[in-house]
Image (cartoon, rainbow, N blue to C red):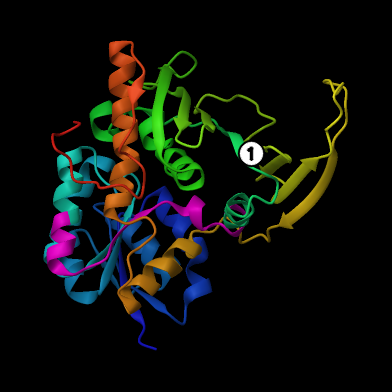
Amino acid sequence: MTTIRLGIIGCGGMTGAHAGGFHHLADRVEIAAVCDVVPERAHQAAELTGAKVAVTDYRELLGHVDAVLVVLPHDLHYEVGLACLEAGKHVLMEKPMCNTEQQCIDLIETAERAGKVLMTAYPVRFWPIVRKLKELLDAKAYGDCFQMSVWTEQFTRYYDGHWALSADRLGGGQFFSHGCHYVDLLLWLLGRPVRGTHIGTNFGTPWMEREGTSNVTIEFESGALGYHFGTWGARGTRLGWSIHAHCTEGMLEINLAERKLYAHTHIKEEKANLDTASRTTVLYEADASGKFTHHELEHFLDCIRDGSRPMTDGPTSLQGLRVIWRLYEAERNGTVADLRGLGLDEAWKPHKPIR
């Protein structure tokens, strides 16, 4: 099996997160080159990954690689992604794909013309524990899901001057930058959206130009509701990173801190109340590598080898971002967002731009 030569463009904090899983795929991928505008970071990344080439201009990297992982500030995704695709490289783009709809469309169409893989790095879909949850939901093992809630409670404060403090560079606020993971996840798990609302605030996160805390509710064609609470201002937490999926025959829970998927069942009495205890069963327990990003990288490599479309390809990723942009627009206008036509399986080319 031919080893794919991968280049990493951008050697900040997220590169370290990716590097933790590279050793799982050492027989399939070689980190051939790394790039960062800060030479010291590029050389540190080369030492960490074993790359033989370390440069400060991404153009100098392209002759050494077959594919690239782009881990840059969001406002640079378009320029660098476009150049890499035009140079004939497969692209794994850190989320979000780009900051505007037209930029996303340009990348998608360029990848299609070049016959190259364009994939957005949404690792949550690829975690084994989340894939087990989807398997159970699709099989209706606990009946129909009527409510799914996702919590992401963390404290994220950037130093003064950091690019992420600029809403223009970030593309929005916490909801766009981090919530895009969970909009994608809700669409994947619950299907086609119908309508929704977003309310955000930077109260509690005054360092953010836009929202640092978000509450999102989406109604789906099935009648199910999806909810996401995300904050970068948590000074303490019990939920941390959690999913609760309420189904007609029980509730499924992912507790990421415990790396466990639970089923809570057997509340059926007509007189059941808040004091009625449910029966709890551990359905799945992930190992320590369960959150590593190598699961998505493995999928990216598979798509390069067999020519298949990534689960989080350009059109799919664009649909999730369109949901966010419509929710932002409705929030500004004080209305409920019309999300029809934005399912992951629906046509993605617009009659008119959303943004």
The single residue placed furthest to the top in the displayed view is 334
The magenta region covers 109-130
In this orientation, which residue lies closer to the viewer: 189 or 1? Answer: 189
Q: Is residue 5 visible?
A: no
In this orientation, which residue lies closer to the viewer: 174 or 16? Answer: 174
In this orientation, which residue lies closer to the viewer: 298 or 248? Answer: 248
What residue do we see at 87% from left, 22% from top?
275
What residue do we see at 35% from left, 47% from top?
95
Q: Name the quadrant containing residue 257.
A: top right
Left or right: 294 as drawn, with respect to 151: left
> Residue tagged by mark 1?
245
Quarter of the figure that contains the N terminus = bottom left
Q: Is residue 281 visible?
A: yes
What residue do we see at 40% from left, 39% from top?
180
Left or right: 41 as drawn, with respect to 179: left
In this orientation, which residue lies closer to the viewer: 322 or 339? Answer: 339
What residue do we see at 32% from left, 50% from top?
316
Quarter of the figure that contains the C terminus = top left
**Mark 1: few/some/many CA within 10 Å (<14, 14-19, 20+):** many
Q: Amino acid at mark 1?
A: Ala
Q: Name the quadrant containing residue 75.
A: top left
Whole-percent x, y for residue 50 in the image = 41, 73
| Residue 117 is inside the magenta segment | yes
Whole-percent x, y for residue 305 in the image = 34, 78
Measured along the vertical axis of the image, is residue 252 above or below residue 212? below
Whole-percent x, y for residue 96 in the image = 32, 44
| Residue 110 is inside the magenta segment | yes
Secondary-structure class at tag 1: strand
The single residue placed furthest to the bottom in the displayed view is 1
Whole-percent x, y for residue 20 in the image = 51, 62
